[in-house]
Image: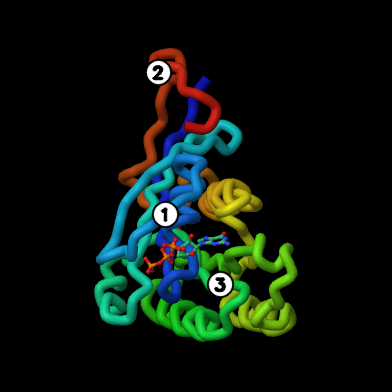
Amino acid sequence: MTKTKIDLKVVLLGYASVGKTCIVTRYTSGQFGDTHTTIGGAFSSKRVVVGETEVLLGIWDTAGTERYQAVNVSYYRRANAAIVCYDLTNRESWEKVTFWAEELTQNEPEIEIYIVGTKLDLIQQGDIKAVPEEEVKQTARRYKAHIFETSSRTGENVSLLFQTIAEDFCKRTNNGTNPVNSNPSNVVNVNTQTQKKKGGCC
Ligand SMILES: Nc1nc2c(ncn2[C@@H]2O[C@H](COP(=O)(O)OP(=O)(O)OP(=O)(O)O)[C@@H](O)[C@H]2O)c(=O)[nH]1
C-alpha cells in the first residue's frame, strides 16, 4: 500500500507572553512548564497521520517581543498555516491578531490562518474573556480564519488544533498533490512495506 508523505510548515505568531512556546511544548512533548522569552525563532517538528498520508509538521515558534517583529517575516515566509495567538484574558494581545492577519494576507495570501485564544483554563476558573466572541468571529470572517481556544496548562484542544491544521491542509492540497499550497518537491510516495513501523502519531 502506498503512503504519501508531505511537509507542512506552520508558524506561530502573536503578542509577547500569549503562550506560543507553551502550545508547541505541550504538543511536541506533552508538558507544561517554565518557558523563556523566545529570541528570533525556534523550530520543532512532529509527524501526524491523516488517512493514508503522513504529514511532517515543521513548527516555527516566533518571538512576540516588538523588537523582533521585523524578523518574523523570515519565519512565516512560505508557511502553509499560521497560528495567530492571543491571550483570552488580555485585550492588548488581541490587537496584534489583526496586525498579523493583515500582514499575512498581504504577504503570503496562501497561508491558512488559525486564530487561537490561549489560556482557556483561566476562563474556566472564572476570568472574563477580554474580547467578545462576536468580535473574534467578525475578524475570523474577514481573514477567512479558523477559531480555536486552547489551554496548554490542561492540554485542552492543543492536539486537536494541529491535527485539524494537518487535515485541512491535506483536503486543500488533495494530499499534497495540488501545487498551489504545497511544496511539490517535498511530496514523496513511499512503499510502507519498506518503511520502519512508526508509532501512531510520532
Ligand atoms: N494559565 C495558563 N498560563 C499559560 C498558558 N500558556 C502559557 N501560559 C503562561 O504564559 C506565560 C508565557 O508563555 P510562553 O509560552 O512563554 O509565551 P510566548 O508567547 O511564547 O512568549 P514570547 O516568547 O515572549 O513571545 C508563561 O508564564 C506560561 O506559563 C495556559 O494555557 N494557561
Q: Is residue 78 visible?
A: no
What residue sits 57% from the left and 69% below the top? 115
* Nearer-the-camera pick, 94 or 98: 94
Label 2: how many residues lie within 10 Å, few (<14), some (14-19) or many (20+)? few
- Could you tell me residue 15's position as x and y percent? 44, 76
Q: Tag 3: residue type?
A: Asp
Q: Secondary structure beneath disc 3?
A: strand
For marks 3 and 2 on the same chain, the one whose residue lies earlier in the sequence: 3
Q: Tag 2: residue type?
A: Gln
Label 1: how many residues lie within 10 Å, few (<14), some (14-19) or many (20+)? few
Location of residue 80 with respect to 186 vertically, above or below: below
Q: Tag 1: residue type?
A: Asp
Q: Mark 3 points at which residue?
A: 87
Q: Name the residue under label 1.
A: 34
Q: Secondary structure beneath disc 1?
A: loop
Residue 91 figure quarter: bottom right
- Could you tell me residue 48's position as x and y percent? 51, 38
What residue sits 27% from the left and 80% below the top? 67
Q: Classify mark 3 as within 8 Å of ligand 1 or not, answering yes or no.
A: yes
Q: Which mark is residue 195?
A: 2
**Real-space CA distance between mark 1 and mark 2, rounded to the nearest whole angstrom:** 37 Å
